[in-house]
Amino acid sequence: MIEFEDVYKTYRAAGREIAALQPTDLNIRAGEVFGLIGHSGAGKSTLLRLINRLEEPSGGRIRVDGEDVTALDDAGLRRFRRQVGMIFQHFNLLSSRTVAENVAMPLQLAGESSRAQIDARVAELLARVGLEAHAKSYPAQLSGGQKQRVGIARALATQPKILLCDEATSALDPQTTAQVLDLLARINRELNLTIVLITHEMDVIRRVCDRVAVLDGGSVVEQGPVSDVFLHPQHPTTRRFVREAEHVDEGEQNDDFQHVEGRIVRLTFKGEATYAPLLGRIARESGIDYSILAGRIDRIREMPYGQLTLALQGGDQTLALQRLEEAEVTLEVLR
Amino acid sequence: MIEELMPNVYWPEIWEASLDTLLMLGGSMLFTVILGLPLGVLLFLSGQSDRPAQRTLYNAISLLVNIVRSLPFIILLILMMPLTGLLMGTKVGLAGTIPPLVAGATPFFARLVETALREVDRGIIEATQAMGATTSQIIFRALLPEARPGLWAAATVTAITLVSYTAMAGLVGGGGLGDLAVRYGYHRYQPDVMWLTVILLLVLVQLLQMSGDRLVARFSHK
């Protein structure tokens, strides 16, 4: 649905060319939630803004639904932008307008609907985000989570096909973040809207994204389904993000490993396998003992997963590993 | 009692002078806003751009604004006389004061407008762009409404500056309270007349500031 072909962006600053985005190919599919993760300055904000051309690409081609948006003239670009909603870290609501007037704004700018149509649409949108009671409030009277919900309602006003989220939850507390992410997931499901979001938190990716691209120094260093990238990160940057999300300190963990004997393995369970009483059965059969060094049971979007790091001692370890290989788990031998 | 305190005050003359001040203020303020608001918007827009042509435009307007602002108003009043004659058909009297007042206040107001527009969150402009707004929609639907409290504050400061300019306009026979203060208070040594005009000007400035503050509060929802 959104295709990047060799797209790059350079700035001229102090007489030097600075690359904000290295030549990038990317393919975002219709109806998916696509995450872009990176530290500040990694180029994720530039990449997001290239989609609706708030940033002009220095080269390459961007196609949306087969249409080359890099070739659009001013009028074409304005028409295209109405099909792309956008929400922001700092909400960017107009302080001079009420909640309802903010939501009505994209429709007023489009100038294609009557006042009654706009009023009806605004009421419907406010109901969708649960803010009917605040239609006449000003943004300054709302909490951060409410403001972002106004932002979402406003972004959906012109019935876009794509929603761009620029660090939409970074200014919110964890509980509000969860609510806003749930709302985004629901919109994605109910409206079959393609969502592209940028964030610096792996947890946001884990909760709502189907696929993810990891950006570092202006290039995509890793991409794929969230379950692959999150559970089996390859690139050092990706690993750092995952460890941050799991609050694991690699140095400390390696120290811990020094103190245990035996073979160290990491098991990753996905889906129903997460709940299977696998370890006990294999331990009994092979006579091994195991101790759990690290572990986490959680969900990626709706899919449950478990990831355990174990030290195996005694018994028939070859048989144990063989049984684990046969079972529905991914086995990595760390030592 | 008032007659004892101010034996030289001739009330019809005070009344006429007050009216002249208000007419000069109202007339010049109107044209200052009509000219200064677009000029301020132009300064803001060209100042934001990084296209060379717009940078040049910004630098040119900016220089012009600074030249006029650096002239003391009393000099501007004299320098502008030929132009005033062309514009108004007279170089003197109430009508003769309007062009120099407008010329003096417009660059000042335009700068304040530019500053007020710069206070508008860049993100709001970006969000409006992302909605597919045209440049004029961005100006009229986002930029100016969001800057409204700042614009009212700018207008208030400008109006008050104009009050003090009108006091100098007596030089070309514009009349008004300032003129009265100089003629009676200074030349004829009638301090009571001078003090009364000072009080009336103070009341005027105070009223302008109060209504300005109210408008600012009325339109800020921050």
Image (tube, coloured by chain):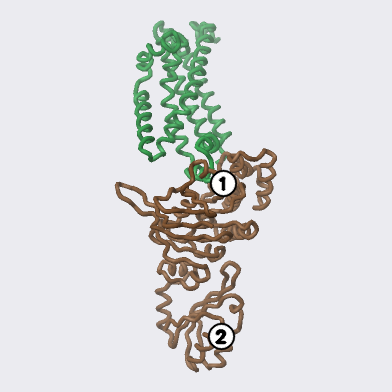
Q: Residue at x 61, y 77 (%)?
A: A272
The numbered mark at residue A82 is: 1
Q: Is residue B26 visible?
A: yes
Whether residue A283 sits left or right of residue B75 in the image: it is: right
Q: Nearer the viewer, residue A184 or B218?
A: A184
Q: Is residue A78 above or below residue A241?
A: above
* Element assignment for label 2: helix
Q: Residue at x 54, y 66 (%)?
A: A206
Whether residue A127 sits left or right of residue A329 in the image: it is: right
As drawn, the residue found furthest toward the left would be A15
> Which chain: green?
B
Q: Nearer the viewer, residue A258 or A20?
A: A20
> Which chain: brown?
A
Q: Is residue A71 above or below residue A174?
A: above
| N-term mark: 2 or 1 | 1
Q: Position of residue A61 (x, y in %)?
A: 44, 53
